Image: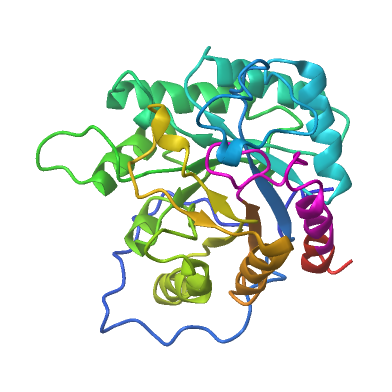
Amino acid sequence: MPPAATATPLPASDAPTPAPPTAAARPPAPQAASRGRLAPLVLANYFAWYDGDKWGDCNISDGDRPLEPYSSDDGEAIARHVRMALDIGIDGFTLQWGAPGERTDRNLRTLLERSRGTGLRSTVIFLRHIWRDGPTQTKVVEALRYLRDEYGGHPNFLTLGDRPVIVFTDVYRVTRDAGKSALQFWADIRQQVDPDRGMIWIAEGLDASYLQVFDGLYVYKITHADYPEDYVKASRWAANVRQWEASTGMTKIWIATISPGWDDRRSTCKADIRVASKPHKKERGDGAFYRATYDAALASSLDWLWINSFNEWVEGTYIEPSVKYGDRAMQLTREFTRQFKGQ
């Protein structure tokens, strides 16, 4: 089961946030792992917007499909995914979430209810700021308050201690007033939604200055067309978090990312909410790439492990059993989660 608390919980404080460390003031990167400070937790990226009759669409990666095709609105399919995740040591999903009342919101509710009575505790990848209707700051505030109030107390919503966890993507992509930085945008949002730091907010990205507002960092995409082995930088990315901690005395979470491969070469046939980038394929190599990303993550003195993804069928990162790859990635995930948790 995922941990309900930490050995040393992250402090909630309304004291002024220290300024980011300058390059000159930064101490050497810590040599010791931070593990043991937080109970090891394994999360997996989860998508709940698939239609049961669309598995032959042009944007499905490599023309593959699930061994058991499904609609994301089918509660039985979600329940099956919950069982599959628990069986291989996943502690929770990070469901890609768009807005209150929208399809992903309805399926989040189903996910939490279908997890009730199990150890799976899930949260969201927050997308409201990049959703299709050009949301204002007010709408972002409303969405975050909604998540906190509607789901934060659910027994299967992910918490750290009693603090609900929210994971954000694309924090740089915000609609903001002239002269205001994206970091200032999020500082204003958090002041309105969570001034007493009763929640845990995790940001995507490499800019440690965002730790002024957020409680941790992770990297979403670890292979790119021009940098296919980007995952090897995991320890360098982690060092940014540890250096911030050492300079400010503030405990922060580093979540390391692993992935079985990548293939989004078919993705451009349909518009979506992603930032345009050069499509590419990173071969799975019968698990070789997945293992390499795991080894790099483990070497980064991670706090938590994030799998990208359980079922991303456009970017080709799914570990869910498929016609093309079978359940190889599921088998490896079980191996990795056991090792990470010291079982």
Q: Is residue 7 in sight in this rendering?
A: no
Where 24 sits versus 137, above or below? below
Q: Is residue 19 left or right of residue 152?
A: left
Residue 275 in percent (x, y) is at 34, 41
Q: Quadrant of residue 162?
A: top right
Q: Is residue 66 magenta?
A: no
Q: Quadrant of residue 272?
A: top left
User: Magenta stretch?
Assistant: 308-335
Determine the residue located farthest toward the left in the rendered image.
Answer: 178
Q: Is residue 182 left or right of residue 278?
A: left
Q: Residue at x 28, y 36 (%)?
A: 174
Q: Is residue 18 in sight in this rendering?
A: yes
Position of the C terminus, as image quadrant, is bottom right
Q: Nearer the viewer, residue 120 or 291?
A: 291
Q: Residue at x 48, y 34 (%)?
A: 126
Main SS category, magenta section: loop
Where 163 sits versus 107, above or below? below
Q: Nearer the viewer, residue 22 or 173?
A: 173
Q: Residue at x 20, y 46 (%)?
A: 181
Where 22 sits versus 54, above or below? below
